[in-house]
Amino acid sequence: MKKLIGLKKIKTAVFISGRGSNLKNLIKFANKKKFPISINLVISSNKNAKGLKFAKKNKIEKKTINFANLRKAENKILYLLSKKKINFICLAGFMKVLSANFIQKFNGKIVNIHPSLLPKYKGLNTHKRAMENNEKFSGCTVHYVTSKLDSGKIIMQKVVKITKNDTIKSLEKKILKKEYILYPLAIKKILINL
């Protein structure tokens, strides 16, 4: 691992759509001296996203983007990213699919956290699907974003045991706890060893 002394933090944008608990967690890590990113912009696809309050509280610029027209939305985001000199993007509960064109512009610099052990259970309702299939394990995955949904190269995973007493809610809680550990670890892994 490279020495982190004098580490220049990588300007990062976090994309959210909802409660923003992973955003809150990433802000906590980004505020640490030896963490490789600074969060300089929060983009939300939902003007009522609870996560926006974490951006406000931490004085991070935030923008809500209307995705009714994908091309317009992405052009607006690209403009904001270039204005803020953003070099890295973390998706954290972002419920929109970015176009191949957008992803190409940030090739290898967009990561996502997904609440399942990919390649199993891409897309939505992962906990419900895992339980309906009587899986013994689930978990979370940090992966690179490509134009195919939840299909990019896996960076790291954490496994969670599904017990017979678990409900969808309790499984979600268990996995979320692991997400808070996994996402910062994965970011350090890829950015510190660049």
Image (tube, rainbow, N blue to C red):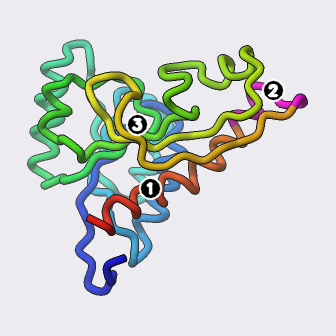
Seen at 13% across and 55% down, the residue is: 85
User: Mark 2 sits on what residue?
Assistant: 167
Quadrant that contains the N terminus = bottom left
User: Mark 3 sits on what residue?
Assistant: 16
Seen at 45% across and 44% down, the residue is: 142
Q: Residues within 10 Å of mark 1 (few under 14, many from 20)?
A: many
- As shown in the figure, which amino acid type bears the numbered disc 1? Ala
- As shown in the figure, which amino acid type bears the numbered disc 2? Thr
**Total count of labels:** 3
Q: Are marks 1 and 2 in contact (CB under 8 Å)?
A: no
Residue 79 horizontal/vertical position (percent): 9, 39
User: Mark 1 sits on what residue?
Assistant: 186
Q: Is residue 166 left or right of residue 97?
A: right
Quadrant that contains the C terminus = bottom left
- As shown in the figure, which amino acid type bears the numbered disc 3? Ile
Taking depth in this image into account, of 168 and 83 the one nearest to the observer is 168
Q: Which residues are magenta?
A: 164-172
In the image, is residue 75 above or below residue 140? above
